Image (cartoon, rainbow, N blue to C red):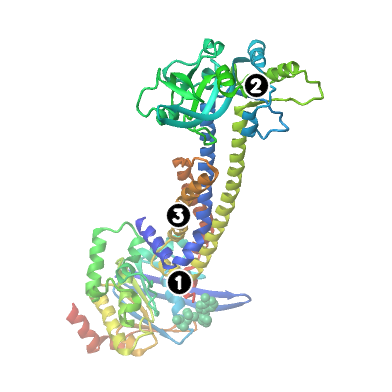
Amino acid sequence: MQDIVLLEAVHKVYKMGEVAVTALNGISLTVKKGEFVAIMGASGSGKSTLMNILGCLDSPSQGKYYLEEIEVSNFSKNELAEIRNRKLGFVFQNFNLLSRTTVLENIELPLIYGKQLSKPDTDRVHQIIRTLGLEEYQKHYPNQLSGGQQQRVAIARAIANNPTLLLADEPTGNLDSVTSTEVMKVLCDLNCNMGITILLVTHENDIARYARRVIILKDGKVLSDTPSKSSTTPASQALCETTS
Amino acid sequence: MPTLFKIALRAIMRNKLRSSLTILGIVIGVGAVIAMVSIGQGAKSMVEKQLESIGTNVLLIIPVSTTHTVTSARGMTAGFATLTIEDTMAIEKECRAVNHVSASVRTTTQVVYGNQNWTTYVSGVGPDYQIIRNWPLESGRFINQRDVNIMAKVCVLGQTVVANLFGTLDPIDKWIRVKNVPFKVIGVLNTKGESPMGQDQDDVVLMPYTTVQRKIMGVTYLGIIFASSVSADTRFEAIEQITALLRQRHRLRPHEENDFTVISQVEFASTIMETSRTMTLLLGSIASVSLIVGGIGIMNIMLVSTTERTREIGIRMAVGAKEKDILFQFLTEATVLSSIGGLVGIIFGIVLSKLVSSFGGWPALLSPPAIAIAFLFSNMVGIFFGYYPARKASRLNPIDALRYE
Ligand SMILES: Nc1ncnc2c1ncn2[C@@H]1O[C@H](COP(=O)(O)OP(=O)(O)O)[C@@H](O)[C@H]1O
Ligand SMILES: [Mg+2]
């Protein structure tokens, strides 16, 4: 299977005046198409930094990043923007929706920065809205929705451009456990049925259980990289089977 | 691009008070530009109209010295007896730059036809008066030299007098009475309209000047001598020749002042031009200062706005907005803001020019190209002053922007 992600000895050093903080200290890993990976680790272990680099929001200080076999680690700001627009979807802990902008317009946001809004695009957006059960909220504003609903809007926006890779940095961090489960079901469904590759940061084992592979970071390094024990748990399995 | 426009409009409407305060400078600037041009044009057209109605080469010789003047109307009609018929004839004969001369004398009196009466100016003039004033007849004939010579009791009526005495009747060959003396109407003048000073020039009865002097006023002096130079360009020559001739005729010694004044209408018009130019300059400086201040206001607000919306910028960048998308977004916003200012400024400018013109007696001539240029200029101000904040926003680093609280 094709490597969606290939990282080779990626370093990230933040310089704050005299002090240099090494957030990533030589990370190498591959992610194949269709994988569902959870990234775990203590606070400050570099999870967000890794996600930002994978999400092309930031570039590594050293090392190489291949996305779908294209090296993007030396791309310009503009090229990175284009990659983010066409190949990546990002879900944040704090949703990051545009307030005073309707749900529908939030979801369509990546499309206005791509090529012209075409019929297939709008059709797909409607399909996504239906899949995520957001039909009746299209004209609402984010602050009129619950946290779980807002995160679903954010997920819808992240996949509006049909990305190859969906990155979620603690997507359930601001949600209660019931809503968290709801959001995880949505992600599982996207992974199983739409074949979207997902990388997810969490520090909750319950959440990590939905993934099939768990990477644990420590001090900017990969501590362990193992298949999820629970990838065969009835819950996750059943979810995929019923929806597929 | 309509999406960008919508985003910009929404951002502006979000903060209505702030936006309106921001555009104030642009409103005043654009308004001043429009008022400036319209007042300038109005004054110019007024002067042109005046020159057309009086004639570019008309010279007035008034029997008052320049030091006494301020050319009061009273001084002119009361007349100092310094100008004579002989002066008139001498000017006609000896001043080579002058081609027509007409003596004139004027009084205000009542004219009667049947049971209608009307108080008007009775002006005594010579045959050349019609040519000098370039004043065509509607019907009948004008006063000729013979009428002057024999003090004929004939008159030529202005349209206002015709309307008030005759209504719809044809006045030709009718008799009107002035101070109980009957005068035969021999001609009717065309409509001349208002003078630049707002006087109704058609409210007049013209007669041979000899007739007015003897039959109506019982005087021998003249009021004004009308003359015309051969061309507009020779008017200075004409003024010099007339001045020299009259000084000689009036036996004025070199240290003595003129006891008359020669006025050219062109010079009079140029005072009006001067005033309007001052006005234009004043408005022009107000306009440029306000446009710059308005532009800085826009820059300031855009800087505040981009800082406030750092997170929004981060979100947009995270989903793939490029530098140029963010740049365009904020540039559009600044431009839309300044265009709204421009539109309001156009309305303000129209009101302002009407106001100034009604106070100053200028016609307000609104010039569509000037309005278009002022509007375009307001857009340019938006682009110019919006560029720096927009560029600053577009250069943000997506992660820093997203992390901004
Ligand atoms: N922008 C930054 N500037 C300086 N240091 C940073 C920055 N972002 C992260 N770091 C540091 O890098 C390390 C990893 O941070 P992060 O990736 O956010 O960890 P995690 O998401 O696992 O909690 C931390 O020590 C953090 O302080
Ligand atoms: Mg983090």
The residue at 49%/66% (across/down) is B306
* Mark in front: 1 vs 2: 2
Any mark on residue B221, and which? 2
In which quadrant is the N terminus of chain A drawn?
A: bottom left
Is any part of residue A221 visible from this angle? no
**Which residue in the protein does label 1 denote?**
B311
Between label 1 and label 3, give the one nearer the viewer.
3
What is the quadrant of residue A66 in the picture? bottom left
Q: Amino acid at mark 3?
A: Val
Earlier in the chain: of badge 2 and badge 3, it is 2
Sequence-earlier tag: 1 or 2: 2
User: What residue does disc 3 label?
Assistant: B344
The vertical placement of B62 against B364, above or below, is above
Q: Secondary structure at mark 2?
A: loop
Look at label 2 and name its amino acid. Answer: Tyr
Residue under disc 1 on the same chain as residue under disc 3: yes
Q: Amino acid at mark 1?
A: Arg
